[in-house]
Image: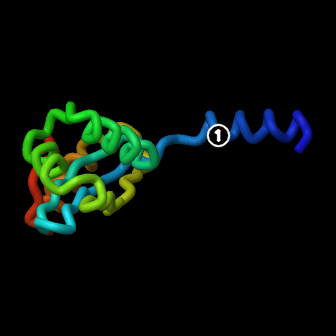
Amino acid sequence: MDNARKKELTRAAKEQKARQGIYAIRCMVSGDVWVAKAAALDKRKTGLWFQLNMGNFPGKSLQAAWGEHGEAAFVYIELEEVRDDNELLIPSLLKEREAHWRQQLGAMALI
């Protein structure tokens, strides 16, 4: 791959907007589910798993379950990407959809 192509791909990656949406964490052992919104769905799992493995995630119920069952018992599920032509509506849409999924799945808040 030549340098011009590398620069083009790098520029395109930087310009790409993060996918915002709703995700769930499910404990396959206990069946517990936590739901939250994310400004960057693609990056959220990595950061979340890091915090949980370090033992410093602020959500006490999820951190306790993680400590009890271990990383292998948990799955990250992208539930929905939230988009709108009017960017100003995204925060309220995220909040609304998070509440919807929490009720739908009988889930707990992440924090």
Q: Position of residue 27 (x, y in %)?
A: 19, 62
Q: Position of residue 95 (x, y in %)?
A: 20, 47
Q: Residue at x 85, y 41 (%)?
A: 5
Quadrant, the N terminus? top right
The amino acid marked with disc number 1 is: Ala
**Residue 87, relative to residue 80: is it above or below?**
above
Between residues 58 and 40, which one lies in front from this camera angle? 58
Residue at point 20%, 31% (across, down): 56
**Crowd class of label 1 (few under 14; some 14 to 19; many from 20; radius 10 Å):** few
In this rendering, would 77 be left or right of 10? left
Residue at the spot 31% in from the left edge and 42% down from the top edge: 48
Locate residue 82: give its quadrant: bottom left
Q: Position of residue 66 (x, y in %)?
A: 18, 49
Q: Is residue 27 left or right of residue 42?
A: left
Q: Quadrant of the C terminus?
A: top left
**Residue 2 left/right relative to 27:** right
Q: Residue at image x 33%, y 61%?
A: 77
Q: Position of residue 22 (x, y in %)?
A: 29, 54
Residue indicated by mark 1: 13
Res. 89 visible in picture: no
